[in-house]
Image: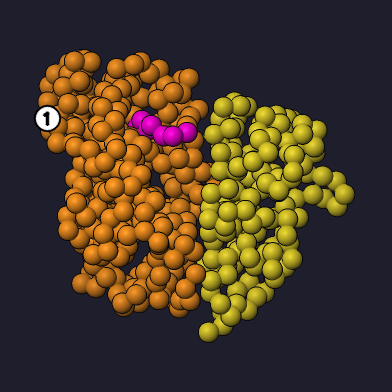
Chain colours: A yellow, B orange
Amino acid sequence: MNHSISLTVNGARRDFVLDDPRVTLLDLLRERLHLTGTKKGCDRGQCGACTILVDGKRINSCLALAISHDGADILTIEGIARGDQLHPVQAAFIAHDGFQCGFCTPGQIVSAIGMMREAQAGDDPERIRECMSGNLCRCGAYAGIVDAVLEAQAGMDETNQRRSA
Amino acid sequence: MKQFDYVRPGTITEAVAAAAQPGAVYLAAGTNLLDLMKGGVSRPDRLVDVTHLEGLDQIETLADGSLRIGALVRNADLAHDADFARSYPAVAEALLSGASAQLRNAATVGGNLLQRTRCAYFYDTASRCNKREPGSGCDASDGENRGHAVLGWSESCIATHPSDFCVPLVALDAIVEIEGRTGRREIALDELHRLPGDAPERESVLEPGDLIVAVRLPPAARGFAAHARYLKVRERTSYAFAVVSAAAALRIENGRIAEARLALGGVAAKPWRARAAEDVLRNVAPTADAFQEAAWRALADAKPSGDNAFKIELARRIVVRALLLAAAGTPARLPALPASPFASTSGAIHA
């Protein structure tokens, strides 16, 4: 049986007909929309490489059935820069060597953006490590990742303060 | 993953009818179920998706002072609800010590209660497992079993229940509201999960079609807010299941314990309420000696199910430390590493 769903992906509405209910959001993004920035690492919810924002919150897209997310608003790594202008988290990852091979990086960056929206970590490096523990980096770039997140977060706090001033 | 039919009911009544069919299971976030389906451990014929049902995602205070948590409230939303964290701090700490931020954002209250064991032999379809395949045997009993149960286990199954959330909930007398084929009923959370006995495949008292719609904390549960902690020993300090955990909650009046609540995680096929330990803490001063006695009682019936005798002593020490931390008072801010005995801000002392 076919099922029709619609999603908003990086700001654009997309309609899909699913001929198989087993399709995950991860596979839908990669195979149907060719948005391959979201990575398939473990495919079992353990590594975080597939992290996306759904309705503003970071989740593992490998453990989310597309069919169950009819109507959801999705943001992927492809949707965070403004044209050629990098998102502040992207720029900070480059500035602080927050990656080596790069495979986990899209998940790390989207997860960091989700973490900042959750506003639970503050500027405590220990909290940031805890709040980012769902994203594994087998190159071990964790020190750079924490520095990048701290800097991006400080920059965004300043921006917000200027806006509200 | 085996092919399945997907059903999205419009009402709870439709959901119950659809899920009462043989081979049907409920789908909430799917953080545990989809993982099991990908591994061929769960092979349902039909998924009944309850995530679009109205009215199951509310946190509400009832007239009598109870708190009612809808089954579809996300773990993170509950833990970060300021009123909730203030009133039930050990529950919030337990929630935040579990899984990763991504999983907590997705996972639901109802799903957390019904998550399956993390026993590696249950997950490995090439192994014998009485829970996955009744009557096939238990490869955990002579396998890698240092993480397995020390309380309530049987020859047929030595698996543990992995939930953190359930541990303080059971200590606080949480009630589970269930919608079934014969209407609404409620049971104590302590009665939801079954010990394995000779039928480990039956993990709960739920009948086909039964849907958990809410979890309720009774009015008395608020009375422990000033002295409540959850402590969890893990192989690593974040994003890992408990080797042993304990929820301790005290009501202290005039320097004496008026009432104590204690439950353990990671030790049995269900969240383990330690009532005998609670009894010896009634109307005594909150001293290390009293807590040692309580810990001894909590583990009095424990016995190793394999290479895991260390868990019994570890559990005693975690019980003592959780009680000491609870007696010292709930911290104003949650520690940077929730529930960690090693957290720099936990104020923990060695028992």
Kindly give the residue lying farthest to the front in the view shown: B142
Give the percent coordinates (x, y) of residue A74: 65, 59
In the picture, residue A120 is in which quadrant?
A: top right
Residue in the picture at 20% in, 60% down: B199
Instruction: In this rendered view, identify the residue nearer to me: A154 or B314.
Output: B314
**Would you identify the image quadrant in which residue B230 lies?**
top left
In the image, A45 versus A160, the foreground residue is A45
Q: Residue at x 31, y 59 (%)?
A: B129
Magenta span covers which residues?
B230-236
- Quadrant of the image containing the C terminus of chain B: top left
Outermost residue toward the right in this view: A84
Q: Position of residue A80 (x, y in %)?
A: 75, 50
Nearest the camera: A148 or A87? A148
Reading the image, the residue beneath label 1 is: B279
B121 vs A5, nearest the viewer: B121
Q: Is residue B293 left or right of residue B139?
A: left
In this rendering, would B68 be left or right of B173?
Answer: right
> Magenta segment, principal secondary structure?
strand
Q: Is residue A129 visible?
A: yes
Residue type highlighted by circle 1: Asp
| Magenta-span inclusion, residue B72 | no
Residue for point 48% across, 19% down: B344
**Residue depicted at x 27% and y 64%:** B136
- The picture places residue A42, in percent across and down from the top left corner, at 58, 54
In this picture, is A18 found above or below A43? below
Specify whether residue A56 is in view: no
- Say if B198 sits above or below A80 in the image: below
